[in-house]
Image: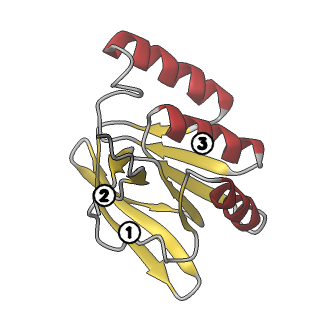
Amino acid sequence: LVLATGSSPFIPPLAGLKTSTPGIFVYRTIEDMDAIIARAATSRRAAVIGGGLLGLEAAKALLDLQMNVSVLEVAPFLMSAQLDQVAGELLEKRLRKLGLSIHSAVELLEVLCNEEGVRFVRLRQNGVESFLEVDLLIISCGIRPRDE
């Protein structure tokens, strides 16, 4: 007997990170894409949490929509599940040339929002805490099996 219950996007347990907040999205369905494109029309700064294959795909799509895009990855290099460190660093170099801002080995501390939606991601990188201003935030941190 096989029960195929599907999967749900993983949302990291991060203060202020709620997909019900305007401007915060997951990247899974065509409806998600339509909502992201609609928000991008009135936004300038975006960030993608997750430097895996789908996260990088989302980041490139946002770049194609003429947005300033940052990729936030907790691992020391991009696509760490598929690549070794040398390949991950080469990929990062290439993506920077395209215009993406890459933040690897980053610790995400909190997402700050107001009545209009997402506004900042507070993070720590190399021991330095900072705020990244965003109008749009995509969560691409993998999936978890549904077991309900």
Q: Cβ–Cβ below 8 Å for labels 1 and 2?
A: yes
Mark 2 Cα shell of 10 Å, populated few (<14), some (14-19), many (≥20) = some
Q: In the displayed image of the protein, which residue is found farthest to the bottom?
A: 115
Please name the residue shown 50% across and 19% down the image: 91
Q: Is residue 35 left or right of residue 93?
A: right
Question: In which quadrant is the C terminus drawn?
Answer: bottom left
Image position, residue 26 (x, y; %): 51, 57
Q: Which mark is residue 129?
A: none
Residue under circle 3?
Answer: 59
Q: Is residue 102 left or right of residue 43?
A: left
Image position, residue 110 (x, y; %): 32, 67
Image position, residue 72 (x, y; %): 42, 45
Q: In the displayed image of the protein, which residue is found farthest to the front?
A: 1
Q: Which mark is residue 12?
A: 2
Mark 3 vs 1, N-terminal side: 1
Which residue type does callout 2 highlight? Pro
Q: Secondary structure at mark 3?
A: helix
Mark 3–mark 2 distance (CA, rounded to whole Å): 18 Å
Mark 1 vs 2, N-terminal side: 2
Mark 3 Cα shell of 10 Å, populated few (<14), some (14-19), many (≥20) = many
